[in-house]
Image (tube, helix red, strand yellow):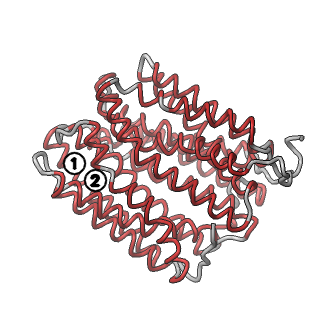
Amino acid sequence: MSARAREKPRTQADHPNWTLVTCVLASSLSFVEGSVLSVALPAIRASFGAGAAEVQWVVNAYLLPLSALLLLGGALGDHYGRRLLLIIGTSIFAVTSLLCALAPSLPVLLAARAGQGIGAALLLPNSLALLNSAFEGEKRGRAVGIWAACGAAAAAIAPLIGGWLVGSVGWPAIFYINLPLALGAILLALRFVTESSEAGAGRTDYAGALLVTAGLGGVTYALTLWSASTRFSVAAIATLVAGAVLLAAFLLVELRRKQRAMMPLTLFEDRCFSGLNLMTFLLYGAFGAAMLLIPYVLITSGGYSPVQAGLAMLPLPVLMTSLSPRMGGIAMRMGPRIPLTVGPMIVALGMVLSRLMTPNSAYWTSAFPTVLVMAVGMTIAVAPLTSSVLGAVEEQHVAMASGFNSAVARLGGLIATALLGSVLGQEGEALFSGFHGAMFVSAAAAAAAGIVALTMLGAVKMRKA
């Protein structure tokens, strides 16, 4: 079948359940990578003698291409074939994971991390698109639910396994665990997954992708330089201005391309769609900062081992995995505004509770309530947020809106990480002091997300998966 052909209807020879397994394995690469790195950062920093800015780029070298290229990755799959792009993305992720593990220097590690981000930007949107083409009706909703739950479960166990590997084998081992997942996904895709594409649907907006990646890179680099020294140097100002100009050029390109744009700007005329994405940026930026800082602080200045730090974060994925589907059903009945207002406010409360975390505090009276309350808030908000984003646009824009919202979530984490240099550069009690300040700022951002939900969300629909 030609890659440019219309989406192929399913036949008796298709294997939707194996397609589900394939998509779970492939997408788990990104979910695992997002959670396991937090317990390995202190070891990576010590191994290379890295400074605060370099530690930030270990995270952001991955998040930058992922957030900038997610929409293009989905469009390429629509245009050339979703299975093909899933296989290519997974292969890139596997090869660059091996390069991360073998990296002899920090620059090589950062380049390989950027390669992982590119691979993830190709495989993530196409794994979900393949599920949509393999299932219909209620079976599709169940498949997407399994896909999301397995991702959360992988994120739950990854810090434990990663912590054990860092403590007993060394940090390069956390990248080796990606290889069997990637190999399994590729082999299953080749054997069982039916190719699908949609003629003319792909928004192959290469100019937009290049401009947004370069623009975000400039802004991120400038913020990283500023956060490390808390002042704007000439280099920081120059890269910030260059990044802003490139982002303005990106918006101009998208405006001219109209419906052929990677991100049609007409969608932002809808107040609900704009509000949901602003809320996503604030909430996930705050949450991303907390998920980076809490394990880092516990290991670096709290006396925790990597395994203990992984265990400390366990309430979060356990609650989200077990209760998010139920919360989605509740939100379908009561509407999204209340959970999307209350959830971020509870997250903000959990972040304020981080003040209980001190160098000598016990886990059950400090880190545990912080993580637990944050987990409750995110559990309330995540499912209604996803459904509301899909319900805020017309049917033909659902896939693009979902991809854009996912990119905005990662962009929030990208910007938050770029602002944490002054905290990551501290040690001992000074690190805890900076940590408390950063968590209070994150709490303010999470609370602002709740206010956005309260004031900007009108009669947004809730769409079933």
Residue 368 occupies quadrant: bottom left
Residue 72 visible here: no
> In the displayed structure, does residue 368 sit left or right of residue 4?
left
The residues bearing labels 2 and 1 have C-alpha atoms spaced at a distance of 6 Å
**Disc on res. 125:** none
Residue 320 occupies quadrant: bottom left
Q: Nearer the viewer, residue 345 or 426?
A: 345
Which secondary structure lies at badge 2?
Answer: helix
State the image coordinates of residue 75 (x, y, percent, origin top left): 73, 49
The residue shown at (37%, 63%) is 445
**Disc on res. 434:** 1
Question: Of the residues shown, which amino acid type is indicated by label 2?
Answer: Ala
Q: Is residue 462 above or below residue 68?
A: below
Residue pointed to by mark 2: 438
Q: Is residue 253 above or below residue 32?
A: below
Residue 228 visible here: yes
Quarter the N terminus occupies: top right
The residue shown at (89%, 47%) is 5
Question: Of the residues shown, which amino acid type is indicated by label 1?
Answer: Gly
Quarter the C terminus occupies: bottom right
Q: Is residue 102 above or below residue 177?
A: above
